[in-house]
Image (spheres, rainbow, N blue to C red):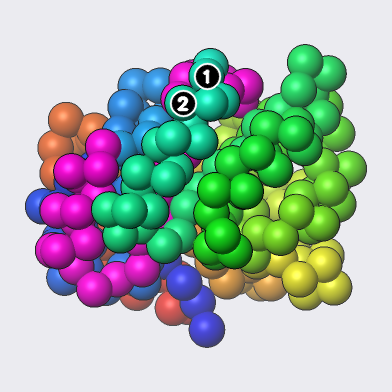
Amino acid sequence: MTLLEVIALDARDAEAAQAGGADRLELVSGMDAGGLTPSAATVRSVLAATDLPVRVMLRDAAGYAPADLDRLRRDAAELRAAGATEFVLGFLDAEGAVDLAACQALLGELAGAAWTFHRALDNAADSVAAWAVVAGLGCDTVLAAGAPAGVTDGLPLLRELAERQAADGLALLVGGGLKQQHVPELLAAGVSHFHVGGPARAGGWDSPVDATAVAGWRGLVNG
């Protein structure tokens, strides 16, 4: 089974993504910083607008180090209280390794919730080593483009990770510069989970999610 995850910023995005055939949403704010934690009010409105699974971002600054980990822990508790049951997070330390202490501090607030380790993996000093570490953290999904610049540069690593995902108990979710022409090659390599943001919008991030665009991706990832 393939999975199509669409980035949503608000309830209108959520409704359009569902109408277009998305399987899951990643809910964020602040895409100018690469995606930050949304407000509890936004979480409540999105959950009221869709019955799709919604993974909520826990990230408070551009880059992959937390600006205020204690505040992020409070945010996590507040978002759970608002109804969030799935999350997206991931941090690196100063050496570019997975920041286990930061990740575990937040996971302590999530009470076993399903979660995705996001594109911090692409920016790790050793992405393959980071994948192995992440596999032990308890997430079910890793969002990756395979390289900081995006999927075009990351295809060799994505093919390698696709071969490892079943053995490591992880789903590789490919996104970040994903283009339609990448999809057939990724499907052939064993990737079945795809993540789109800007390409699901007719006019980029200043426009809402477009159901027709999502439907186009839905057909494409179905092979």
Q: Is residue 179 left or right of residue 161?
A: left
Q: Secondary structure at mark 1?
A: loop
Q: Tell me the amino acid under the disc marked 2.
A: Arg
For disc 2, the marked residue is: 71
At horizontal 56% and vertical 25% (from top left) the residue drawn is 69
At horizontal 59% and vertical 41% (from top left) the residue drawn is 106
State whether residue 200 is above or below residue 125. Answer: below
Residue 98 x %, y %: 77, 35
Q: Which mark is residue 68?
A: 1
Q: Which residues are magenta?
A: 39-66
Q: Residue furthest toward the bottom?
A: 1
Magenta stretch: includes residue 49: yes
How many numbered callouts?
A: 2
Front-most of 183 and 27? 27
Query: Within 10 Å of the Cα at label 1, are there few (<14), some (14-19), or many (20+) other Cα atoms?
Result: few
Circles 1 and 2: CB atoms closer than 8 Å? yes
Residue 32 x %, y %: 34, 21
Q: In terms of image quadrants, where is residue 122? A: top right
Front-most of 99 and 26? 99
At horizontal 51% and vertical 36% (from top left) the residue drawn is 73
Magenta stretch: includes residue 41: yes
Can residue 181 be seen here? The reply is: no
At horizontal 88% and vertical 43% (from top left) the residue drawn is 129
Q: Is residue 47 left or right of residue 112?
A: left
Residue 45 x %, y %: 14, 53
Query: Within 10 Å of the Cα at label 2, are there few (<14), some (14-19), or many (20+) other Cα atoms?
Result: few
Q: Tell me the amino acid under the disc marked 1.
A: Asp
Q: In terms of image quadrants, where is residue 142? A: bottom right
